[in-house]
Image: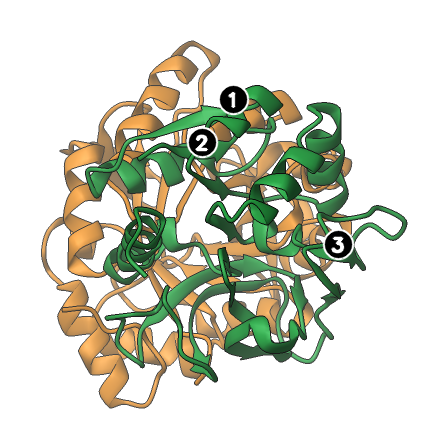
């Protein structure tokens, strides 16, 4: 199987690469529409700024190919900013358009507690989840963000509460995403990546 | 369900080897950074900090290689810094494998550096490190590894640093550093009250009770320590079990 890490000049790509490597999974970096089209499954890593990410994808002509890959049924995993990029818009970059796989928007978390939301937190599961299979209910995951999707309709399968309840894991058909960093979340994070790879490899 | 308090081992390096000292002086060798990183990753550290306390330009390539070696061992976040003076140096540290970078001396000289780094990498990647020492009835920020006083009030500087773009504060008590006499809870609490971002307390770590104090009285979001972990005086698992029993939310690991 051919797993592609979408490279757009920013992000946490090397740590995702290393985390996959520890699972014995080979991945390759793709930064062109042609290379992207040749892949079986995609991971969109991300740290930084919503507007900067979308501009980088735009400059590399990767926005439509990413949307096409999803509509062809290719598995896609978004991580942190990669989750946020799946939405239509974000408070972080008013005027910039996301991949719009989901019609909702990404919001600035209200300053009810310390921000950025930085560190290890637990999840509240609301629907069956493929990514969370085999992961203990009380597991902690590593978050580092100030923006979040407060609503993803039926695609929200697990939430986290910090300043406001927000989407921590979303799944819809072949689209998966986590607001936390599985590549930085120790053994339970490795389980999440392994679950994605297993799904991408054909297990349903 | 709530955000866990973090326990963060710190590797002070001369760029290449882990070193340690008391009150920022009398440095001696304490091991290989990658080997220690691998150990802490397994033992349940929530994050790792690696600092280049020599921070000389000549040694920078060596330190970047150290970051790469350390990052390769970790499935937890890594913060690195020491002498970062501009965006390009920050980028080099993040590209080498760090998730966050610390800035100290250069930010005091030029607070807009925090704004530039936050604009480039996001404020979640920018940690403002402050070395503070009690002077009369306040705390003063020191720079250049704690050797040069600035006349600047540490609490006020933390507040301004966050306004400028810092996403986290690492506050080191120079009075407590290396003494194993407990964290500086009044200093940490003063910083914590002054800012809206997470605060990491550093300097003075000793028994599990001293960690409990800095989370309760010091209002710290995270606590950092070096020698008690390097010398196996305190086990990470045992420490986190104790804190959990005391009602502090911590991430328990196997």
**Chain appearing in green on the rendered image:** A
Q: Chain of mark 2?
A: A
Q: Is residue B33 left or right of residue B141?
A: left
Q: Which residue sits furthest right?
A: A95
Report the Cα–Cα distance between label 1 and label 2.
7 Å
> Colour in which chain B is shown?
orange
Above or below, A144 against B33 in this view is below
Q: Which residue sits furthest front?
A: A72
- Front residue of A145 and B191: A145
Number of other residues with Cα within 10 Å of mark 3, as a class: few under 14, some 14 to 19, many 20 or more: some
Residue name at image x 59 percent, y 32 percent:
A10
Q: Secondary structure at mark 3?
A: helix
Report the Cα–Cα distance between label 3 and label 1.
46 Å
Label of residue A35 in the image: 1
Please say if the residues under marks 1 and 2 sit with CB atoms less than 8 Å apart: yes
Q: Is residue A166 left or right of residue B99?
A: right
Label of residue A39 in the image: 2
Q: Secondary structure at mark 1?
A: helix
């Amino acid at each position: 199987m051919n797993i592609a890490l979408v490279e757009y000049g920013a992000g946490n790509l090397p740590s995702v690469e290393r985390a996959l490597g520890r699972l014995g999974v080979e991945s390759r970096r793709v930064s062109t529409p042609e290379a992207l089209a040749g892949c079986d499954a995609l991971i969109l890593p991300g740290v930084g700024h919503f507007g900067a990410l979308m501009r980088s994808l735009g400059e590399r002509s990767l926005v439509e190919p990413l949307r096409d890959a999803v509509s062809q049924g290719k598995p896609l995993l978004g991580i942190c900013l990669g989750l946020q990029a799946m939405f239509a818009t974000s408070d972080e970059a008013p005027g910039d358009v996301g991949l719009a796989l989901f019609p909702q928007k990404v919001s600035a978390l209200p300053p009810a507690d310390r921000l950025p939301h930085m560190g290890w937190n637990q999840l509240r599961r609301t629907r069956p989840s493929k990514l969370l299979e085999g992961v203990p209910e009380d597991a902690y995951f590593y978050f580092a963000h100030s923006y979040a999707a407060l609503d993803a309709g039926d695609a929200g399968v697990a939430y986290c509460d910090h300043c406001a309840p927000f989407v921590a894991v979303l799944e819809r058909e072949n689209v998966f995403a986590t607001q936390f960093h599985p590549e930085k979340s120790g053994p339970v994070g490795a389980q999440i990546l392994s679950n994605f790879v297993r799904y991408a490899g054909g297990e349903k | 369900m709530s955000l866990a308090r973090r326990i963060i081992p710190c590797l002070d390096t001369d760029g290449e080897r882990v070193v340690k000292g008391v009150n920022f002086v009398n440095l001696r060798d304490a091991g290989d950074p990658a080997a220690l990183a691998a150990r802490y990753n397994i033992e349940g550290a929530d994050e790792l900090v690696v600092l280049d306390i020599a921070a000389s330009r000549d040694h920078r390539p060596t330190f970047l290689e150290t970051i790469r070696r350390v990052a390769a061992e970790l499935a937890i976040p890594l913060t690195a810094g020491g002498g970062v003076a501009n965006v390009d140096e920050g980028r080099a540290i993040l590209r080498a494998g760090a998730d966050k970078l610390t800035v100290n001396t250069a930010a005091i000289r030029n607070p807009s550096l925090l704004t530039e780094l936050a604009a480039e990498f996001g404020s979640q990647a920018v940690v403002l490190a402050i070395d503070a020492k009690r002077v009369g009835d306040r705390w003063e920020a020191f720079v250049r590894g704690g050797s040069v006083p600035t006349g600047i009030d540490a609490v006020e500087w933390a507040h301004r640093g966050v306004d400028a773009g810092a996403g986290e504060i690492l506050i080191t008590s120079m009075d407590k550093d290396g003494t194993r006499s407990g964290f500086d809870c009044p200093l940490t609490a003063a910083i914590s009250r002054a800012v809206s971002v997470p605060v990491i307390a550093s300097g003075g770590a000793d028994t599990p009770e001293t960690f409990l104090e800095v989370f309760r009285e010091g209002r710290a979001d995270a606590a950092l320590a070096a020698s008690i972990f390097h010398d196996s005086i305190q086990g990470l698992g045992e420490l986190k079990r104790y804190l959990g029993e005391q009602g502090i939310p911590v991430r328990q690991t196997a």
